Image (tube, helix red, strand yellow):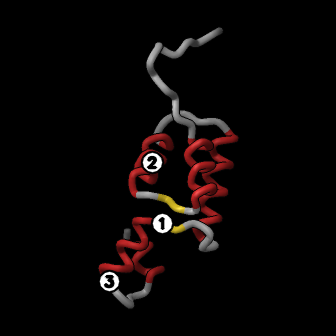
Amino acid sequence: MVVFKPIGVCMILIRDLVRQVMMTGFLSVATEEQLRQLLRTKYDTEDLNAFMSLQEAAMAGLIRQESRESIMATNGDENPLEEAVLA
């Protein structure tokens, strides 16, 4: 069965967003929200693997996260791991 996308609709893939974040080293709040929305839909193994790679990079500190930086700026010297769990 062949499925056609409607003209004018651009399908964004998780792996494309991850590739962009990995290239820039920065995960914006807007991109995080896009990822959340895409993760609520059907996706394939390649997208899941890309997302897991992004999570690993973020945990290793290789990716700056806008949402975490704003939490740190708001809370000063409080424990960032504690705040990440609460976010």
Which residue is found at the position 40% from the left and 66% from the top? 67
Q: Nearer the viewer, residue 87 or 23?
A: 23
Vertical order, 69 against 77 (above or below): above
Which residue is found at the position 44% from the left and 45% from the top? 34
Quadrant of the image containing the C terminus:
bottom left
Q: CA distance from mark 3 to mark 2?
A: 25 Å
**Callout 3: SS:** helix
Vertical order, 23 against 56 (above or below): above
The disc placed on residue 65 is 1
Furthest residue to the top? Answer: 1
Disc 2 marks which residue?
36
Q: Mark 1 and 2 residues: CB-CB less than 8 Å, in contact?
A: no
Q: Amino acid at mark 3?
A: Asn
- Horizontal and vertical percent position of residue 22: 62, 56
Q: Amino acid at mark 1?
A: Gln
Quadrant assignment, res 9 = top left
Disc 3 marks which residue?
75
- Horizontal and vertical percent position of residue 14: 57, 42
Quadrant of the image containing the N terminus:
top right
- Horizontal and vertical percent position of residue 82: 43, 80
Q: Amino acid at mark 2?
A: Arg
Q: Residues within 10 Å of mark 1 (few under 14, many from 20)?
A: some
Q: Nearer the viewer, residue 36 or 13?
A: 13
